[in-house]
């Protein structure tokens, strides 16, 4: 059985592994159809991803086919042959976070493809409660549900209200997802991105008119764009320390800064500025089942057109050779995808 393993930073290899055993109690055997390539995967390849350990079979943005269902304690909402998306967060169900319904930040969190082996293999076993059947959604789009959930969860965390102005910094896939669900929440969205090509793509695909590039005088430009006020909610989706530090200056008095991306290192800010503005600082990690339901409902309604987002596809044999190039801006990758059929 084919699998792709990241042995160490910069070293991706196509290998043969044993096929999985039959699913046990509350387990499901799945056949992988599509794997979305996430920033997590690209950063792990470069050796700068938080929480990641090597060697690792990556892949947590997944569309799979149900092959076999083991004995289950409760009825499930899918059958053998169904195409499903995967919730890749393996939470313990017992810790303080899980007991409060915050399974996305379980103290014992294990994420497929990060802490434990993920879906860059032909078949594997998943817990029975980690699959969601989503009829009517193309398989390629189903593989992007988890990515969209990251943005949806960030918007949910922000408590963004209709009519507010939201600045989304960074228009990679997570920034696109965040902006899409900020719009869905009724916000007036402003985009900021250093790469003009990415910015143009985001404006076109999301239907956002207001935008700017980082540089000198960003706060003043935001005030001009936003009728004399800074945005009340700012989402930083860059994973850049410099951007995250600067983002504190872009939030209106009484507003919120949501850090969607994360870095290896510390984030510092001016305490006088933070207190004088009475800012709210929010971290956003992973997503919940409710976020998955929101995203799937949104896709079923046709409110987000994902077709232009998928710019590159590769077979397992091809991906080993092209993966490194997907990290380069000149390659023009918005969303790349691994296909097993």
Image (tube, rainbow, N blue to C red):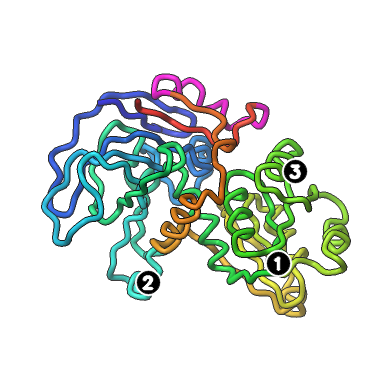
Q: Which mark is residue 6?
A: none
Residue 199 in sight here: yes
Query: Where does label 3 land, which residue?
Result: 194
Instruction: Give neighbour class at mark 3: few <14, some 14-19, many 20+ (Cα, 10 Å).
Output: some
Residue 71 placement, left or right of 231: left
Is 283 drawn above or below residue 8 in the view shown? below
Q: Residue at x 73, y 46 (%)?
A: 193
Which quarter of the rendering shows the C terminus?
top left
Is 325 part of what is drawn in magenta?
yes
Q: State the CA–CA distance, disc 3 to disc 2.
A: 37 Å
Is 198 part of what is drawn in magenta?
no
Return the disc, 1 or 2, that comes first in the chain's sequence: 2
The span picked out in magenta is: 315-330
Query: Where does label 1 land, which residue?
Result: 269
Instruction: Give neighbour class at mark 1: few <14, some 14-19, many 20+ (Cα, 10 Å).
Output: few
Q: Position of residue 14 (x, y in %)?
A: 36, 24
Residue 197 placement, left or right of 313: right
Q: Judge depth for marks 3 and 1 and give the one in front.
A: 3
Is 39 drawn above or below residue 241 in the view shown? above
Q: Position of residue 13 (x, y in %)?
A: 38, 25
Return the disc, 3 or 2, that comes first in the chain's sequence: 2
Q: Position of residue 29 (x, y in %)?
A: 21, 41
Query: Closest to the observer: 282 or 208?
Result: 208
Q: Judge depth for marks 1 and 2 and give the one in front.
A: 2
Query: Where does label 2 land, which residue?
Result: 101
Query: Closest to the observer: 44 or 173?
Result: 173
């Amino acid at each position: 059985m084919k699998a792709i393993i990241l042995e160490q930073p910069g070293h991706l290899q196509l290998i043969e592994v044993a096929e999985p055993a039959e699913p046990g109690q509350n387990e499901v055997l799945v056949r992988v159809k599509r794997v979305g390539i996430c920033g997590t995967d690209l950063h792990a390849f470069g050796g700068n991803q938080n929480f990641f350990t090597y060697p690792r079979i990556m892949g947590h943005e997944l569309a799979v086919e149900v092959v076999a269902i083991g004995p289950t304690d409760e009825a499930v909402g899918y059958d053998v042959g169904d195409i499903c998306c995967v919730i890749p967060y393996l939470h313990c169900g017992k810790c303080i976070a899980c007991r409060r319904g915050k399974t996305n930040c379980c103290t014992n969190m294990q994420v497929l493809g990060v802490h434990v082996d993920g879906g860059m293999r032909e078949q594997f076993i998943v817990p029975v409660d980690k699959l969601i059947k989503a009829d009517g959604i193309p398989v390629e789009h189903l593989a992007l549900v988890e990515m969209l959930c990251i943005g949806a969860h960030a918007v949910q965390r922000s408590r963004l209200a209709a009519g507010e102005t939201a600045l989304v910094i960074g228009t990679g896939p997570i920034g696109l997802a965040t902006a899409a669900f900020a719009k869905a929440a009724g916000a007036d969205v402003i985009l900021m991105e250093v790469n003009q090509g990415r910015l143009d793509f985001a404006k076109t695909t999301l239907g956002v008119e207001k935008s700017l590039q980082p540089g000198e005088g960003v706060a003043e430009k935001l005030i001009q764009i936003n009728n004399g006020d800074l945005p009340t909610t700012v989402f930083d989706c860059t994973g850049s320390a410099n951007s995250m530090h600067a983002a504190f200056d872009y939030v209106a008095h009484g507003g919120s800064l949501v850090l969607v991306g994360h870095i290896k290192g510390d984030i510092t800010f001016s305490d006088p500025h933070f207190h004088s503005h009475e800012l709210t600082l929010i971290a956003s990690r992973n997503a919940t089942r409710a976020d998955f339901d929101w995203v799937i409902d949104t896709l079923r309604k046709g409110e987000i057109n994902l077709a232009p987002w998928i710019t590159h596809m590769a077979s397992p044999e091809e991906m080993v050779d092209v993966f490194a190039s997907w990290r380069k801006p000149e390659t023009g990758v918005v969303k790349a995808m691994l296909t097993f059929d």
